[in-house]
Amino acid sequence: MDKRSKIALYVIGAVILLMMIAEVTKPKPLNWRDSYSAADKIPLGCYVLFNELKTFSNGDVQENTESIFLYFKNKEAPEEKQSLFIINGYVRLTEQDADALIDFVDDGNTVFLSSKTLYGNLADTLNINIQMDYSSLLKEPANNEFTSPSQKESNRLFEDVIENAYITSLDTLNTTILGTMSIEDETETESHPNYIKTVFGENGGAFYIHTNPYAFTNYHILNGKEDYTATVLSYLPKQQIIWDNYYKSGRKIITSPLRYILKSPALKWAFYISMFSLILFVIFKGKRTQRIIPVIDKLENSTVEFTQTIGELYYQHGDFTNIISKKIQYFLEFVRTKYFLDTNNLNAGFIEKLALKSTNTKEDSKAIVDYLLYLKSKTFHTESELVELNKKIETFTKNNF
């Protein structure tokens, strides 16, 4: 190898090394995934809130890592009242979970639930309906305010990283509105409840429902919204807090179909040993006996040739009516599959939809539809009409293939 070739190799090697170093050392992109997990320090995690909850808890904060039904089933009834925190973008409770949660509050405990949605038995029992604001394609800034004048200083405007949701119906006899949200419009500003307290049962239990879970994430707490978060939690009684870490978008779970096997150490190692043994068997068995793989010729596609032959037979016999009928059927099938339009009624509404979904003008769409209707009304057709129909279809569909 001459000196010039060595220099070229050294340069190529240096460039590859620099690219590898740049790839390894470049900063990781910010993770904006909705998590709400106590362990996540990403913007939409709840690491900061979880570590500050001891201020609001009467004793150590407990964690729940299983469904509510199983948690209360396997846990002895505490001597003192407790508060269960459920914070997530959406909360999907089974019928058993909802019943367990209702029984928990009926015993005099408290549930704080912050979510953009609430469905099922729990929503029906509390007569609560939560609605998302879809009035704009953009996520509009929203004022989150407290109904108490003494908490006015804690009101905050959430300008970004928010999806506005509010409560549209509630039990007026047992519910107190603690906070509202409003979106400033050019014409008017409407306020809707977004934080309520619903008394439930005869033992002093209550549900606190909040519709802005983003307020409890690291992003907003560390960007000037900590007073709002603290004020929301100040309405809750001073009880031992149970932090739910199960109903979380960022919950760490094994998504493999083998999760039952992988959860058990004995089954997991048995599975690994079996797979390793199977791989060794395949490797050694494959070296000893391997059949010759036969070459299979690819099937020929004779559809085009067959279609051309049939078309020529129709044309030679002068059966222009049959050809026109099939071309009309083919064109209408193209419209149905390409634009998802109903071709049963070729009326003015159909023409407008066809022009809107295709790259043709309304006049062109009307012209071809009128010509189709004209041909369908006749029982006998000529060669010139077939040629004209073919030209119109090709002109109409030339930009759609």
Image (spheres, rainbow, N blue to C red):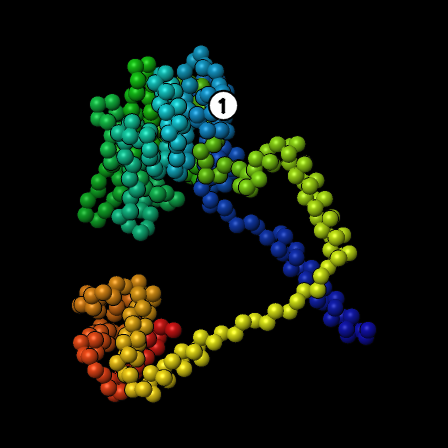
Circle 1 residues within 10 Å: few <14, some 14–19, many ≥20 = few
Q: Nearer the viewer, residue 186 or 292?
A: 292
Amino acid type of the residue tagged 1 in the rendering: Gln
Which x, y percent locates residue 257? 55, 41
Mark 1 highlights which residue?
62
Res 322 → quadrant: bottom left
Which x, y percent locates residue 316? 34, 88
Residue 142 in sight from this viewpoint? no
Q: Nearer the viewer, residue 362 or 142?
A: 362
Q: Is residue 20 above or below residue 350?
A: above
At mark 1, the secondary structure is strand
Residue at horizontal 82%, vertical 73%?
1
Query: Which of the image's four quarters has the C terminus?
Result: bottom left
Q: Is residue 70 left or right of residue 356?
A: right
Outermost right residue: 1
Res 177 → quadrant: top left
Residue at horizontal 33%, vertical 35%?
119
Q: Nearer the viewer, residue 367 or 203?
A: 367
Residue at horizontal 64%, vertical 69%?
295
Residue at horizontal 25%, vertical 44%?
184
Which x, y percent locates residue 311? 36, 81
Q: Nearer the viewer, residue 254 or 208?
A: 254
Q: Is residue 33 left or right of residue 275?
A: left
Residue 36 in sight from this viewpoint? yes
